[in-house]
Image: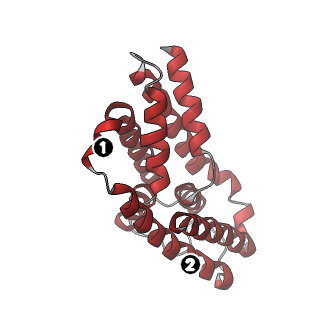
Amino acid sequence: MLTAALSGLFLGLSLIIAIGAQNAFVLRQGLRREHVFVVCLTCALSDALLISLGVFALGTVTDLIPGIEPALRYGGAAFLLAYGLRSARSAMTGSSALTSGDGARQGLGATLATALAFTFLNPHVYLDTVLLIGSIASQYPGREAAFGAGAVTGSFLFFFSLGYGARLLAPVFARPNAWRVLDGVIAVVMIGLAIKLIL
């Protein structure tokens, strides 16, 4: 059981650690100290749901919804492209620096909706959590639940570390140019992912 759980943990961490739209959003929320707990919990619970779906119902999902892949791909690409263009505009025109408590805060509802969109409109999350983790879990017969629990633990560790660890970078982001660089990186990542999905 321990071997399966550790394998799930390390696989989950290795899949999630690469910078992507969702991670960039969590990082930004952590830097701004806006709704950090809710964002981290939402992303981690969403991963837990998708990992469970992959571990326990992989075959059923593709049988029930055979046309899900193109819909996810193009819908996700449109969302990522729009957010990437917004970040690019902010990188070119932004002049704000991170100051504790300053700046316009996004409401909890809008923040939650954005976190859910970054999670469920990204086709890669289905490939990683449902398909890949689900197929690898099947290699641990009788221990699939332990494998899935390890992967879920990895998601919780990662998102909360990223969200709250971002505060350590707050002094860097007190400079306006640092925000512009972050927005530029986010724009490149998101537009790149959108193009990759379309192609």
Residue 54 appears at what percent x and percent y?
38, 37
Circle 1 residues within 10 Å: few <14, some 14–19, many ≥20: some
Q: Residue at x 64, y 81 (%)?
A: 94
The numbered dot on residue 158 is none
- Left or right relative to 178: residue 26: left
Q: Which residue is mark 2?
A: 85
Kind of residue at disc 1: Val
Query: The residue tagged with tag 1: helix, strand or loop?
Result: helix
Quadrant in which the C terminus appears: bottom right
- Give the image quarter of residue 11: top right
State the CA–CA distance, disc 1 to disc 2: 33 Å
Does residue 76 appear in the picture of this structure? yes
Q: Earlier in the sequence, mark 1 or mark 2?
A: 1
For this rendering, which residue is in front, 186 or 168?
A: 186
| Residue situated furthest bottom in the rendering | 93
- Left or right relative to 52: residue 94: right
Q: Residue at x 39, y 46 (%)?
A: 46
The numbered dot on residue 61 is 1
Q: Residue at x 32, y 57 (%)?
A: 67
Kind of residue at disc 2: Leu
Q: Nearer the viewer, mark 1 or mark 2?
A: 1
- Give the image quarter of residue 85: bottom right
Does residue 40 appear in the picture of this structure? no
Query: The residue tagged with tag 2: helix, strand or loop?
Result: helix
| Residue situated furthest left in the rendering | 64
